[in-house]
């Protein structure tokens, strides 16, 4: 939908336009790569003229930064909420696993762009996102540690990276499985990487 004119005659921007630009960029970049996609193509995919993209993003690099920020902030905010609102470490860990699976299945394009295109960011933005990624990993480590007292910090982080990597394998491989079956298998696999059985935690969507 383009910008419209309200009843009082004042022209207003479409508040949904920025989200549509990001969604279009995620889809195109995940399929073709960051450098192969032009801003006017992103605009066309979002249903606007190419120049309209520049009203929200000064450059293609700015758009990429916003896209990757969106992915990282979504994961970090949910992880912080899960850990803060779940008293049991076992339940918290399973909820972190299932939330990551949910993002991998529903926001596949954005996560795929993060993995493939983070190297294209300016140095300062890349370092900032890496710091945020480390903070996200530490949320997992914090609840895994009490469940695996046999492991040191480095070993805990290795297992967390392995579990997240197992989930994110689905970003680059189309299995043909139903979403429910895929989520079940990823849940079992990620927990196996962590060395902790899945808990009967409540539905992650309720957190």
Image (tube, rainbow, N blue to C red):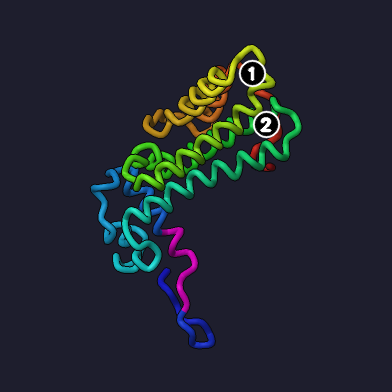
Q: Which residue is mark 1?
A: 197
Q: Residue at x 27, y 44 (%)?
A: 32
Label 2 CA crowd tier, 10 Å (few <14, some 14–19, many 20+):
many
Q: Is residue 187 left or right of residue 69?
A: right
Question: Residue 86: horizontal and vertical position, in percent?
Answer: 73, 35
Q: From this viewpoint, is residue 172 visible? A: yes
- Residue 35: mark: none
For the N terminus, the quadrant is: bottom left
**Which residue is at the far front?**
124
Pointer 2: what residue? Answer: 92
Identify the element where label 2 is drawn.
helix
Asked if one can make out residue 185 in the rendered structure from this viewpoint, the answer is no
Whether the magenta-drawn stretch holds residue 183 is answered as no
Q: Quadrant of the C terminus?
A: top right
Spot occupied by residue 49 in the image (x, y as percentages of width and height): 30, 67
Q: Which residues are magenta?
A: 12-20
User: Does 119 sit above or below residue 69?
Assistant: above
Instruction: Give how far across and how far down residue 160 sits, in percent.
Output: 54, 25
């Amino acid at each position: 939908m383009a910008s419209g004119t309200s009843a009082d005659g004042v022209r207003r921007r479409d508040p949904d336009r920025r989200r549509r630009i990001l969604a279009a960029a995620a889809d195109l970049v995940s399929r073709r790569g960051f450098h192969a996609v032009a801003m006017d193509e992103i605009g066309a995919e979002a249903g606007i003229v190419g120049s309209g993209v520049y009203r929200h993003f000064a450059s293609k690099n700015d758009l990429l930064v916003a896209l990757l920020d969106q992915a990282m902030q979504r994961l970090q905010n949910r992880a912080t909420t899960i850990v803060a609102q779940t008293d049991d470490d076992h339940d918290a860990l399973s909820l972190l696993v299932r939330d990551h699976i949910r993002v991998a299945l529903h926001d596949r394009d954005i996560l795929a762009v993060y993995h493939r295109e983070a190297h294209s960011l300016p140095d300062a933005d890349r370092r900032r996102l890496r710091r945020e990624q480390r903070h996200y990993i530490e949320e997992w480590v914090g609840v895994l540690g009490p469940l695996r007292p046999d492991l040191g910090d480095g070993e805990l982080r290795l297992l967390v990276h392995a579990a997240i990597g197992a989930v994110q394998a689905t970003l680059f491989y189309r299995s043909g499985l139903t979403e429910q079956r895929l989520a079940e298998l990823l849940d079992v696999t990620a927990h196996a990487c962590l060395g902790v059985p899945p808990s009967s935690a409540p539905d992650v969507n309720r957190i």
